[in-house]
């Protein structure tokens, strides 16, 4: 039987918020408007399994104030554990709702991540910002690409601090983005809400598409992504391992 701490649902040692999309947005807005720094992570089955295999990641994930289940596999595991999560909350969808909120409330977002240059010479974050400000008038984004070396990290922090943005999207892929937030959070002077959002900037920019509705509705988004990008197969092997591990070990942390 799975334990339920402070309303959170434990799935193999990661403590998820049991929220619908609307509740997740309410909580994100509350955190955006709280001066203290906080962050949100969006783990799917693959990332929970990465925690199981590398337990140092648990602190990185569970240190977040909002942990949403961004995958059908996590919701399925919560049902196996008999503490069902209400629904899958896709990070990319929640990210867009936060953008809509920011556009209506004059809040600037810093987009950190994505490729330096796409076919038309612009960084992915710039194309994403342009498309989003057409869709959400008044939306203002600043940003930089997500390819950098350790020596550049200090400059990146300075750039984020100087931007004055209170909301930061970190889109470097998992678990790099979560580790980056965890390791740098004490140096972020103005940001009070950071969100780890994987490939979302690519979706906003139109560089990569989300699966058609049919796949989303039938919990087959993972299958669509695999079809489009067979090199993900290795990473996706974590999904059956994660489900089998849940059946065998319940919500036990680690292996
Ligand atoms: N990325 C980045 N820096 C890196 C590695 C990746 O900015 O060093 C970006 C990449 O361009 C893409 C995103 O991170 O936009 C990862 O997308 P993916 O869909 O693989 O995310 P995940 O499924 O890992 O959350």
Image (cartoon, grey):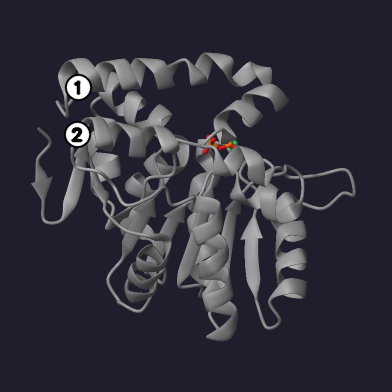
Q: Quadrant of the C terminus?
A: top left
Q: Secondary structure at mark 1?
A: loop
Q: Residue at x 33, y 21 (%)?
A: 242
Residue 21 x %, y %: 42, 61
Residue 12 x %, y %: 22, 30
Q: Is residue 78 visible?
A: yes
- The correct choice, above or below, for 98 with respect to 248 in the image is below
Residue 218 falls left or right of residue 206: left
> Could you tell me how far apart the alpha carbons at marks 2 and 1 are, in whole angstroms?
7 Å
Residue 6 falls left or right of residue 156: left
Marking on residue 254: 1
Q: Residue at x 40, y 17 (%)?
A: 240
Residue 19 falls left or right of residue 215: left
- The correct choice, above or below, for 7 with respect to 252 in the image is below
Q: Residue at x 48, y 57 (%)?
A: 157
Residue 7 x %, y %: 15, 56
Query: Contact, CB < 8 Å: mark 2 with mark 1?
Result: yes
Q: For this rendering, which residue is in front, 159 or 76?
A: 76
Q: Is residue 158 visible?
A: no
Mark with earlier residue (2, 1): 2
Outermost residue to the right: 120
Q: Residue at x 44, y 56 (%)?
A: 195
Marking on residue 13: 2
Quadrant in which residue 204 is drawn: bottom right
- The correct choice, above or below, for 230 with respect to 224 in the image is above
Q: Secondary structure at mark 2?
A: loop
Q: For this rendering, which residue is in front, 10 or 81?
A: 81
């Amino acid at each position: 039987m799975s334990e339920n701490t402070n309303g959170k649902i434990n799935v193999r040692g990661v403590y998820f918020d049991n929220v619908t999309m609307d509740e997740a947005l309410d909580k994100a807005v509350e955190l955006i408007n709280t001066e203290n720094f906080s962050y949100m992570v969006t783990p799917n089955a693959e990332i929970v399994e990465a925690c199981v295999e590398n337990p140092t990641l648990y602190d990185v994930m569970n240190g977040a104030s909002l942990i949403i289940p961004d995958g059908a596999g996590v919701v399925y595991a919560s049902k196996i554990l008999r503490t069902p999560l209400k629904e899958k909350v896709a990070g990319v969808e929640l990210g867009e709702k936060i953008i809509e909120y920011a556009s209506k409330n004059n809040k600037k977002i810093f987009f950190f991540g994505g490729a330096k240059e796409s076919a038309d010479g612009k960084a992915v974050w710039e194309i994403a910002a342009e498309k989003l400000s057409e869709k959400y008038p008044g939306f203002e984004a600043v940003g930089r690409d997500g390819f950098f070396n350790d020596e550049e990290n200090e400059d990146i922090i300075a750039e984020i601090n100087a931007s004055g943005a209170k909301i930061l999207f970190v889109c470097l892929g998992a678990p790099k983005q979560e580790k980056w937030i965890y390791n740098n959070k004490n140096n972020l002077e103005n940001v009070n809400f950071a969100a780890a959002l994987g490939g979302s900037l690519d979706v906003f920019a139109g560089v990569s598409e989300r699966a058609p509705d049919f796949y989303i509705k039938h919990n087959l988004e993972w299958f669509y992504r695999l079809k489009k990008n067979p090199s993900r197969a290795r990473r996706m092997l974590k999904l059956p391992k994660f489900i089998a591990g849940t059946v065998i070990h319940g919500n036990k942390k680690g292996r």
